[in-house]
Amino acid sequence: MTKTAWKRHWEQVKFDSRHDFKMCLDCQARLRTKKANERAKAIRAVYRDLGMKRVKGSLGGIYYE
């Protein structure tokens, strides 16, 4: 779920006190996306700390050198 889609969803449900965030599929999707983004940032930080550069290949792949 993208951030804009999450904002739209949140505007719809934030005044509903009965909204169950643990059972809502949209809320679960946002949590999965947020965790994946945090994990990717951590991996990039480790590579950066090791002195490696993130490079895009000619075919669109991403690798470190």
Image (cartoon, helix red, strand yellow):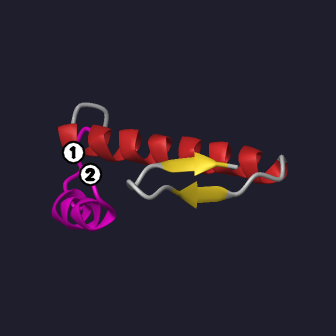
Q: Give the residue type at disc 2.
A: Met
Magenta-drawn segment: 1-20
Q: Secondary structure at mark 2?
A: loop
Give the vertical position of 58 relative to 8 (above or below).
above
Where residue 36 sits: x, y (%)? 46, 41
On the image, numbered disc 1 is attached to which residue? 26
Residue 41 shows which numbered tag?
Answer: none
The front one of 49 and 24 is: 49
Q: Which quarter of the figure has residue 15?
A: bottom left
The front one of 22 and 3 is: 3
Q: Give the residue type at disc 1.
A: Asp
Residue that protrudes farthest toward the left in the picture: 12
In reply to whether residue 34 is colored magenta, the answer given is no
Task: State how many labels appear.
Answer: 2
Is 46 positioned to the left or the right of 23 in the image? right
Where residue 63 sits: x, y (%)? 57, 47
Q: Which quarter of the figure has residue 16?
A: bottom left
Q: Residues at badges 2 and 1 in contact (C-beta under 8 Å)?
A: yes
Give the vertical position of 39 relative to 44 (above or below).
above
Give the vertical position of 52 relative to 25 (above or below).
below
The front one of 37 and 51 is: 51
The front one of 43 and 8 is: 43
Residue at the spot 71% in from the left edge and 57% down from the top edge? 53
**What's the distance in space between the residues labelled 2 and 1, CA to CA?**
7 Å
Would you call the spot at circle 1 few (<14 residues within 10 Å), some (14-19), or many (20 or more)?
some
Is 17 positioned to the left or the right of 52 in the image? left
Would you call the spot at circle 2 few (<14 residues within 10 Å), some (14-19), or many (20 or more)?
some
On the image, numbered disc 2 is attached to which residue? 1
The numbered mark, 2 or 1, whose residue comes first in the sequence reads 2
Q: Nearer the viewer, mark 2 or mark 1?
A: 2
Residue at the spot 21% in from the left edge and 45% down from the top edge? 26
Q: Secondary structure at mark 1?
A: helix
